Image (spheres, rainbow, N blue to C red):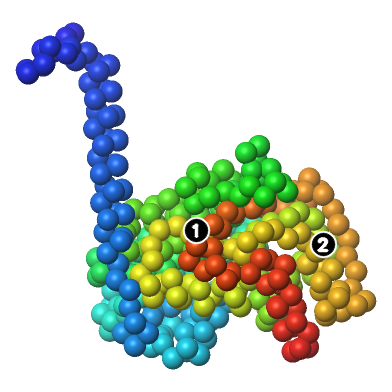
């Protein structure tokens, strides 16, 4: 059936109506995104004296405690959050009491002993990692508060356009292509949904490394495994990069940032450094990714991220091997 369109002789058929609908939806979505980007440009930069940070994960979390420690060291007004991410009333009450200008979300479930746990605890994973994180972003948005989310870059895997060893990394604008674990799948969803909030900065960390030798530290993890794979990856040296996260938040920066050091480093390169700086008697055994998949419930992502956007902000950011030397020198000094 043809419907006559007033002011035009162009016939609108059923197909055209659905095309027109799709076009209008696209225009609406585009306008919304443009509007978000416009609003995001308005998140104000804050002076150190004006800023008040509330850190989720700051009480017991490995990264959260590190952030809080750095904030305290630099003299910022800051506090660890007490409320649970999924409890909206509790969060609202805490925000009204503590009146932060900045929220940092370093809370979320990562699984015990590892992300395989998320495969059999999907509802609990969703409750913290999606419902909880969105709750926080939404409340922060309604209250006009900047939020920094500690997300992950484990949402990509090497492919034909970004082959291993090519130096061609995934940029922030490229769609994630890794859904091999439920943990990463929740992070892919969150990564996308958070971008509808103009007050949110999402930092995509990978395989975080620090000089504290905590069990969560990538160095500690791979020195304890009976066998390890040997694949170059983008990684985040927290000693160097936690201060940059705080600086980006203070500046009111928003959007997605690949948040790793430039370049890639392999498992064997790190283990060789461990042997050199920490324990000369240390040895290890490799196995293949296929063999690793046989002992895991979920797959793990291996990739290189393009960090040009971050390097523009912080040109002094160290290449991963150089940053690792700093870390190992600290570990050697403290051990
Ligand atoms: N470590 C990594 O390899 C890595 C890599 C990339 C990204 N990340 C992301 O960075 C964030 C922090 O990681 P992490 O290594 O510091 O983890 P972590 O040591 O396990 O700390 C997680 C923190 O989140 C809190 N938490 C969990 N569920 C919560 C909820 N529903 N409400 C409030 N707090 C909750 C925990 O508090 P309770 O102890 O009280 O439960 C804990 O303080 C996570 O979102 C993780 O996905 C980590």
Question: Which percent across, then down, holds residue 7?
Answer: 7, 18
Q: Is residue 185 above or below residue 285?
A: above
Q: In this view, does 142 lie to the left or right of 182?
A: left
Q: In which quarter of the image is residue 149?
A: bottom left
**Residue sitting nearer the eye, 305 or 297:** 305
Residue 141 seen in the current view: no
CB under 8 Å between callouts 1 and 2? no
Question: Which percent across, then down, holds residue 92?
Answer: 28, 74
Q: In this view, does 71 lie above or below 30?
A: below
Label of residue 41 in the image: none
Mark 1 surroundings: few (<14), some (14-19) or many (≥20) residues within 10 A: some
Residue 313 seen in the current view: yes
Q: Is residue 119 above or below residue 5?
A: below
Mark sitting earlier along the chain (1/2)? 2
Residue drawn at 25 percent across, 40 percent down: 28
Question: Which percent across, then down, holds residue 18?
Answer: 26, 23
Question: Which percent across, then down, holds residue 15?
Answer: 27, 16
Q: Which residue lies furthest to the left in this view?
A: 6
Q: Is residue 170 left or right of residue 193?
A: right
Q: In which quarter of the image is the N terminus?
A: top left
**Which tag is nearer the camera, tag 1 or tag 2?**
1
The residue wearing badge 1 is 309
Residue drawn at 27 percent across, 30 percent down: 23
Residue drawn at 78 percent across, 67 percent down: 270
- Circle 1: element type: helix
**Residue sitting nearer the eye, 45 or 233:** 45
Mark 2 surroundings: few (<14), some (14-19) or many (≥20) residues within 10 A: some
The residue wearing badge 2 is 268
Cα–Cα gap, marks 1 and 2: 28 Å
Residue drawn at 22 percent across, 13 percent down: 13
Is the CB of mark 1 within 8 Å of ligand 1?
A: no
- Circle 2: element type: helix
């Amino acid at each position: 059936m043809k419907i006559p369109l007033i002011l035009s002789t162009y016939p609108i058929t059923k197909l055209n109506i659905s095309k027109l609908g799709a076009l209008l939806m696209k225009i609406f979505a585009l306008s919304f995104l443009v509007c978000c980007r416009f609003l995001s440009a308005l998140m104000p930069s804050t002076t150190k004296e004006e800023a008040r940070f509330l850190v989720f994960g700051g009480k017991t979390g490995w990264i959260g405690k590190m952030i809080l420690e750095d904030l305290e060291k630099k003299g910022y007004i800051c506090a660890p959050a007490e409320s649970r991410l999924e409890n909206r009333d509790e969060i609202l009450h805490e925000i009204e009491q503590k009146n932060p200008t900045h929220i940092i979300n370093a809370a979320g479930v990562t699984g015990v002993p590892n992300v395989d746990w998320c495969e059999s605890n999907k509802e609990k994973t969703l409750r913290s990692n999606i419902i909880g994180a969105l709750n926080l972003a939404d409340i922060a948005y309604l209250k006009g508060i900047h939020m920094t989310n500690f997300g992950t870059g484990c949402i990509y895997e090497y492919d034909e356009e970004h082959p291993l060893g090519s130096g061609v990394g995934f940029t922030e604008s490229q769609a994630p292509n890794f859904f091999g674990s439920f943990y990463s799948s929740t992070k892919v969803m969150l990564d996308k949904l958070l971008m509808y909030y103009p007050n949110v900065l999402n930092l995509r960390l990978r395989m975080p490394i620090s000089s504290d030798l905590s069990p969560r530290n990538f160095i500690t993890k791979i020195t304890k495994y009976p066998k390890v794979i040997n694949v170059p990856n983008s990684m985040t040296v927290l000693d160097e990069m936690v201060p940059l996260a705080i600086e980006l938040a203070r500046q009111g920066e928003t959007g997605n940032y690949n948040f790793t050091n430039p370049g890639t480093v392999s498992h064997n390169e790190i283990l060789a450094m461990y042997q050199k700086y920490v324990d000369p008697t240390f040895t290890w055994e490799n196995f293949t990714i296929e063999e690793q998949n046989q002992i895991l419930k979920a797959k793990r992502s291996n990739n290189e991220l393009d960090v040009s956007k971050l390097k523009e902000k912080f040109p002094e950011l160290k290449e991963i091997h150089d940053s690792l030397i700093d870390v190992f020198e600290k570990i050697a000094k403290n051990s």
